[in-house]
Amino acid sequence: MKVNRFGQGKILSPDELKLLFTEGLTSPRDRALFAICLFTGCRISEALALQTTDIKSGTITFRKSTTKGKLKTRIVDIQPALAAFLDEYQPKPGALFPGRRGITEHLTKFAAHKILVTACDRLALEGVSTHSFRRTALTMMSSAGVPLRHIQEISGHNDLGTLQRYLEVTPEQRKKAVSVIGF
């Protein structure tokens, strides 16, 4: 689905996000899945591996065994918008996003991709991938002035160089950057 993005998923605008979550993603499960990816900056594989017990006391725990590189466990706070999507979705105990009975414990990355493709086709959105939510979250945090070290802690990136490749600089940010130069 990536269109002229040099192998990267599109960073979604607030309007595109609103459209996806109100008209594109049609089930509480699908909205909860992609809301976790957006509001925590996690990878789709990390969201799909979550158990219902990983959500407690206003946090989501991404266990070391399910993260890329398997280096460390991360805990991310659940903000109110994500809490609303999670409240709407009421899964049974076990896998947060269960797969087909007897075939897979969790929903697969292929199934998640298919859900997103269907939603984007419905809305005529191009260039969106499951990784778009992660890139969008990290770029939004950076644009809001959140220090890179804090973003790194949330995203689980091992080094700042890798994290910086995720972040897109907008024309407005470039203008603001040069506007501070002078005497």
Image (tube, grey):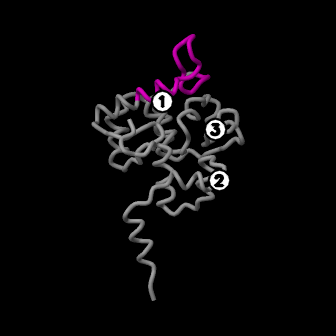
Give the amino acid at mark 1: Tyr
Mark nearer the N terminus (2 vs 3): 3
Residue at 64%, 30% in the rendered image: 53
Where is mark 3, residue-wise?
68
Judged from the image, the secondary structure of the residue bearing numbered disc 3 is helix
Mark nearer the N terminus (1 vs 3): 3
Residue contact between numbered discs 2 and 3, judged by CB atoms under 8 Å: no
Magenta region: 93-115
Give the amino acid at mark 3: Lys
Q: From this viewpoint, which residue is outermost toward the top? A: 102
**Main SS of the magenta segment?**
loop
In this rendering, would 97 be left or right of 114? right
The residues tagged by marks 2 and 3 sit, at their Cα atoms, a distance apart of 13 Å
Which one is in front, 131 or 32? 131
Where is mark 1, residue-wise?
89
Residue at 70%, 41% in the rendered image: 73
Judged from the image, the secondary structure of the residue bearing numbered disc 1 is loop
Residue at 28%, 36% in the rendered image: 123
Mark nearer the N terminus (2 vs 1): 1
Which one is in front, 121 or 31? 121
Please check the rendered image and state whether residue 99 is part of the magenta-colored stretch, yes or no.
yes
Give the amino acid at mark 2: Asp
Where is mark 2, residue-wise?
159
- Tell me if mark 3 has few (under 14), some (14-19) or many (20+) residues whose alpha carbon lies within 10 angstroms of its own: few
Residue contact between numbered discs 2 and 1, judged by CB atoms under 8 Å: no
Q: Quarter holding the N terminus?
A: top left
Which one is in front, 125 or 154? 125
